[in-house]
Image (cartoon, coloured by chain):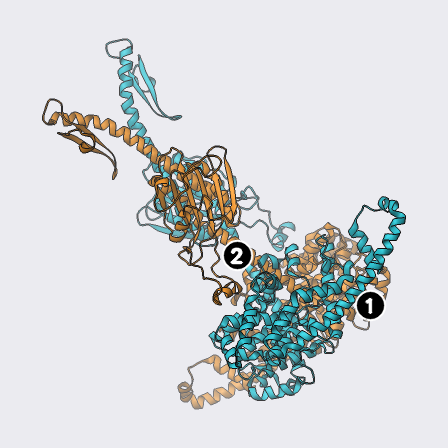
Chain colours: A cyan, B orange
Amino acid sequence: MDKQTGYVTRNLLATPIVMGKEVLAVFMAVNKVDASEFSKQDEEVFSKYLSFVSIILKLHHTNYLYNIESRRSQILMWSANKVFEELTDVERQFHKALYTVRTYLNCERYSIGLLDMTKEKEFYDEWPVKLGEVEPYKGPKTPDGREVIFYKIIDYILHGKEEIKVIPTPPTDHWTLVSGLPTYVAENGFICNMLNAPADEYFTFQKGPVDETGWVIKNVLSLPIVNKKEDIVGVATFYNRKDGKPFDEYDEHIAETLTQFLGWSLLNTDTYEKMNKLENRKDIAQEMLMNHTKATPDEIKSILKFKEKLNIDVIEDCEEKQLVTILKEDLPDPRTADLYEFRFSDLPITEHELIKCGLRLFFEINVVEKFKVPVEVLTRWMYTVRKGYRAVTYHNWRHGFNVGQTMFTLLMTGRLKKYYTDLEAFAMLAAAFCHDIDHRGTNNLYQMKSTSPLARLHGSSILERHHLEYSKTLLQDESLNIFQNLNKRQYETVIHLFEVAIIATDLALYFNCLFFRKRTMFQKIVDACEKMETEEEAIKYVTIDPTKKEIIMAMMMTACDLSAITKPWEVQSQVALLVANEFWEQGDLERTVLQQQPIPMMDRNKKDELPKLQVGFIDFVCTFVYKEFSRFHKEITPMLNGLQNNRVEWKSLADEYDEKMKVIEEMKKQEEGNTTEKAVEDSGGGGDDKKSKTCLML
Amino acid sequence: MDKQTGYVTRNLLATPIVMGKEVLAVFMAVNKVDASEFSKQDEEVFSKYLSFVSIILKLHHTNYLYNIESRRSQILMWSANKVFEELTDVERQFHKALYTVRTYLNCERYSIGLLDMTKEKEFYDEWPVKLGEVEPYKGPKTPDGREVIFYKIIDYILHGKEEIKVIPTPPTDHWTLVSGLPTYVAENGFICNMLNAPADEYFTFQKGPVDETGWVIKNVLSLPIVNKKEDIVGVATFYNRKDGKPFDEYDEHIAETLTQFLGWSLLNTDTYEKMNKLENRKDIAQEMLMNHTKATPDEIKSILKFKEKLNIDVIEDCEEKQLVTILKEDLPDPRTADLYEFRFSDLPITEHELIKCGLRLFFEINVVEKFKVPVEVLTRWMYTVRKGYRAVTYHNWRHGFNVGQTMFTLLMTGRLKKYYTDLEAFAMLAAAFCHDIDHRGTNNLYQMKSTSPLARLHGSSILERHHLEYSKTLLQDESLNIFQNLNKRQYETVIHLFEVAIIATDLALYFNCLFFRKRTMFQKIVDACEKMETEEEAIKYVTIDPTKKEIIMAMMMTACDLSAITKPWEVQSQVALLVANEFWEQGDLERTVLQQQPIPMMDRNKKDELPKLQVGFIDFVCTFVYKEFSRFHKEITPMLNGLQNNRVEWKSLADEYDEKMKVIEEMKKQEEGNTTEKAVEDSGGGGDDKKSKTCLML
């Protein structure tokens, strides 16, 4: 200092003012007057005054720090507020946050440059380069190898009249880019603080005013915005601190906080893009699926024969009544086809013919004309439902049809219709046909164990919710919507009944809560009705309460779903094998795919236990259902009779098997007496293994 | 104070110490000694010392505030850091954030209670209530009507040994819940600060130690966590400030910042759930779609007739060679079916028979045996590709087949095969068959205008990217993967060729960049080859450079795609009508669905202009392609000849039409001369309208 000023320092008393580790100032007394050096006493006075000075300095500095931290948390809060407002794209998200925090940034201008994130070029864009016709790109690249291209700049002007300028595909000589600083930051990922921009030698900032406002660049702070994958996504640049001073380390700290937060928040914009993609892919797949499952005009023609006579376009204009007459003639006679009987069997009928039978049932309950269902739509829907069932061993279209037919028979022959309106009966019949649509031949537990997408989507009643959702999706297509001429309230009723009816077919509900824990609910209704003196009274008792109607309907669905067990023995014995085979196929999958030991019911090696399992199933699940229904309406007794007859058959088979087992067991015991020692040596002692070998021997 | 202490205050000098609007302290001097009151001088001394005291107090307070703000921004930064780490569920997200910020919370314990968000119950859960068998819920509810159920509590213990306790489905007498405070907060959404918890009368906090550590509750701060929809999602409760004092307004402020941030961040956990749902739905739809499109065993049997003789299971073990022989015998003879000819026409052949023809072509290029393609897989793939094409007017399976057949003919008859390996030829033939799979009969522009999910997914070459993606999806199913016995590198080559070949069929690329801007690329190759002296030289020139091979292949795809225009006139005239009809159908859709006027090419009302459009199409698009190919390989000249012949035909039709138009125009002029005034009165002056009426007259 002496050299610069010409002053001569002879002696000096100095002390730093320290706050934490930071030196806020140095306090000096220079050249003691009237003495060659400062005395002990001087030092004391000096340090006494120092306390005051230092406290004021500390207060000032603490205040500054408080202000910084306060701005920092405000910036974070406001950015978070905006970022979490909605899921949106990068541009919008950055803009919302950056605009909201503008007052806390303490600068005259700031701008954000967004970088092109494309990593790979289209093959045809690279051809000219590969052929050597075009020079390969040699310009600046981001650390992860992208060409540095700012596809958009948003410029926030806070001095004078506040203004925001959006510059799409900015030219390289735009004032925000011309210095080369943002490109440099995008290339290297450094935070650059230019204390005196005009004097900078490395970057060439525009010296004069950048626009008509006359504003000039004085100092610049530029930072990269980096996502969690460490890719540089954009560059934020701040110009001219409000008080004219250069940006200091605290400004850097605040700006870094902001850019860091924005960088992290890109998780949301990435998610937004991913989600849109997923949604589009889902929509595409669903549209393609509909295109494949919806009955084609040719398929509809195969049912509606008369179309061959008429022109398709003409049909639309036909009188609905006339159409119905024509159609009815084409369909099977319900009486000769046993459609009104509990003993009905689908086995002699083709799957295609069953579609016609299904259609016929809607006519029989007189809902087609009443609810103005266009016959073509009804046919398309019925055919599409049929196509919705997969070709699995048991839960295929035949099962779907049977449940519909039993629902029909319970309503008509079983006289349960009296509790329901025509609309409700319509919904119940339609729901019954749909109730297992797109069944995969494996049960809910298998979905869970294999963590199939279905199980990941639905928390409980997995398949049932899928059947329901599929059924509802079909109705959303107007050309399949058999309920298209209902009013809104009616339509909602139908949808609600679909939900209750289809979800109710989840036997787990039946076991867990629907009836076993609360089996009294259905039983109580039956009890109450038994005591009524007149039919009218019973009808009133039930119909006055929608919940009772729902409970009866849910129980009807169970009765329909299990109805195979009530069929004549020659049918039941065949169908039981289908059910068993589907179970065994699942068992095979469990063994091969999941590498687990299936339960006995699904274990092919225990197929001889089928009769015993059937007896148990009849006793613990079915008997209650059909007994109660027979008590409720004596017209339903044929089902109970069928069930009891089948129990006799299965029991005798089970006894036969037990008898055989007993004989073998005894033979084995005798043999064991002879070769005990050898057996112990040979086997690992697996009792189960031995059992299954025995089964195979039978 | 005097009353309490017995002291007598006679006089008093007092002043507040103020910072901003806040009174930090009051400074008092009481009872002047030796005088009845404080003098002016006393006041001066008093205020002089006050300056010092107040500065120290201010410094202390500012420090406290700085500390608060600093903790606040640390909490925000760390929470943000965790929240944006990954998309995850509520529990994990809250835990990650809450655990990370623990040191900034300055309390002995804190816990978070997560609320059950279920708004509606399952219908079967409500039945007992509706039947009056169970009392309806009367307990506390959140403002949006949910029952207050804490399904999980996470308890953070910071005193003593740091510990985290997770309590799933906590009992109501758990120490965190027993006071009723969290439930109260969940019910009302208030921030509750209990300065002296044990003395509280409204809530009954556990008085003694809450667990074996002996820790007791002293003061409590409890806040709701509210999402942006204003639903209360959880309750955060903080216990015992570290310094023993009660929580003050600044603590409330910090805690509120944290809970607010966590509440906002629920956008991410909601998104996480939505995204999982979407993904599952997409997977479900794609699996269902595959189930519907994949050729069934019956369909495969319809092609592989011999299967009826053999057992399906046996086939897998058959010698591949034997199978091939059997299959070849079943397939059409390529010579009699014209499969080697450019003039080939699919019109006399059924769509089902075309599947067999397609299979045959793979045998003809000898790739089935060479690349160990299981015949059943090849058949399933070919049949599935056929099923992947929709029944649209032009871009259906017949078109797909034709492109495959032309690719085959270009390779074999056109002798372009010599530039490609067997593997490449295999990929090119397969890609050609797939190139328009699942085409919807409308073009890319229509996808964009109707903002179909396809257009939202793909930014450019919309349909082509879809055809490609679909083709690749098929290969991902091992039972459809005709490339299953290739090694990884070979497989990647195939996929790359699929990409180039299928994307290259986007004619817009052809127009924009692929060739018109750089048409020189293909032309240059042809030029260079023309100058070569030997065939070997030309082969070497091309094959040494993968880019040249790609460019030729891309041009081959275009030649295949447009090949209908080179067919004998009786074929071309029929196929051109199919193309035109598909365009007109799109035009109809544009008019009805998009309510836009279609371009002339798609305007049914301008169907008479078809010959003129065809001539233009031949001149501006096709001639270049087939001329260059004929120059490249003279064996391809039949295509150019066909094209030129068709040009003659279309031109004569166009001239005929022009002639007719001229006559009508003259007639109209004559008429106009007579009735000018009347015409002006009648029409709105729409020249276009008149034109189309004229067209209809023809």
- What amino acid is found at the position of numbered circle 2 in the picture? Lys
Q: Position of residue B501 (x, y in %)?
A: 67, 60
Image: B169 above or below A277 = above
**Label 2 environment density (alpha carbons within 10 Å; few <14, some 14–19, many ≥20):** few
**Residues at marks 2 and 1, CA–CA distance in whole angstroms:** 47 Å
Parent chain of label 2: B
SS for tag 1? helix
Q: Where is residue B233 in the image (x, y as percent from the top left)?
A: 45, 52
In this view of the protein, which residue sits in the foreground, A101 or A474?
A474
Snapshot quadrant of residue B385:
bottom right
Badge 2 or badge 1: first in the primary sequence: 2
What residue is shown with label 2? Answer: B274
Q: Where is residue A221 in the image (x, y as percent from the top left)?
A: 41, 39
In this view of the protein, which residue sits in the foreground, B568 or A20?
A20
- In the image as oriented, which residue stretches furthest toward the right? A674
From this viewpoint, is residue B392 visible? Answer: no
**Which residue is located at x 13 percent, y 29 percent?**
B11
Which numbered marker is on residue B307?
Answer: 1
In what quadrant of the picture does the C terminus of chain A appear?
bottom right
SS for tag 2? helix
Q: Where is residue A374 in the image (x, y as percent from the top left)?
A: 56, 81
- Residue A20 lies left or right of residue A292; in this view the side is left
Image: A655 above or below A427 = above
Snapshot quadrant of residue B44:
top left
- Residue A399 lies left or right of residue B23; in this view the side is right
Parent chain of label 1: B
From this viewpoint, is residue B251 visible? Answer: yes
